[in-house]
Amino acid sequence: MAFQLPELPYALEALEPYISRRTLEFHYGKHHQAYVNNANKLAEGTRFEGADLETIIREADGGLYNNGAQAWNHTFYFMGFGPEGAREPQGALAEAIERDFGSFEQFKEAFNQKAATLFGSGWAWLVKDSEGRLSIVQESNAGNPMRNGLTPILTCDVWEHAYYLDYQNRRPDYLSSFWNILNWDVISERY
């Protein structure tokens, strides 16, 4: 089955004023769709035809890896948002954040620092290792921590197309707004 652009669980204007409808029309509707389309074209006729995106992330290289990872990364990113839901981590994830970062506020500061200082384009990720310990990693371009055996919990897209229409080159302003639209019910379930 071909990869599909997933339907968002919220309306395009639901994240305003933090992320505008216009940004979602471009970022989700055009960029994300292009990664899905390209992954489908590049997988055709290869051993990855019919594979899932996780397999492509772990095993593919070149253009197929880049587009497959970007399709997966964007889906993961967009599905962590919502106008409803908890605004802070819950349950086991909240306890793990406190254990590994000291507090939710200290975690947010550390995450923002990693996201703000990633040179160029890429992603900041909250991940857990095989023992359940949390850390924050930077991945350039289409990078995905699954390739290194880590489990993604949360991600922030720091490619300029994620925020340029709303924030221009002000990545720190985008990062401040990012925390206002996270649905921690979804993110806590990932842990």
Image: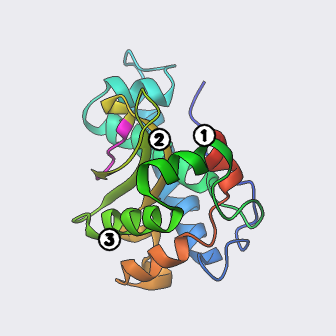
Question: Quick check: marks 1 and 3 in contact, CB under 8 Å?
Answer: no
Q: Residue 67, position in %: x, y?
A: 39, 42
> Which range of residues does the magenta coloring cover?
140-145
In the picture, measured across the screen, residue 179 lies left or right of residue 83, that is left
| Amino acid of disc 1 | Arg
Precedes in sequence: disc 1 or disc 2: 2
Label 3 Cα neighbours within 10 Å, binned few <14 / some 14-19 / many ≥20: some
For image coordinates 52% across by 62% down, the residue present is 104
| Amino acid of disc 2 | Pro
Foreground: 19 or 155? 155
Check disc 2 and report its element: helix, strand or loop: strand
Check disc 1 and report its element: helix, strand or loop: helix
Q: Quadrant of the C terminus?
A: top right
Extreme residue in the left direction? 119
For image coordinates 21% across by 65% down, the residue present is 119
For image coordinates 45% across by 73% down, the residue present is 175
Label 2 sits on residue? 152
Does the image show residue 158?
no
Q: Give the overall secondary structure of the magenta segment.
A: loop
Q: Quadrant of the N terminus?
A: top right
Question: Quick check: marks 1 and 2 in contact, CB under 8 Å?
Answer: yes
Check disc 3 and report its element: helix, strand or loop: helix
Examine the image and state in which quarter residue 14 appears.
bottom right
* Depicted 101 relative to depicted 63: above or below: below
Label 1 sits on residue? 190
Label 1 Cα neighbours within 10 Å, binned few <14 / some 14-19 / many ≥20: some
Label 3 sits on residue? 116
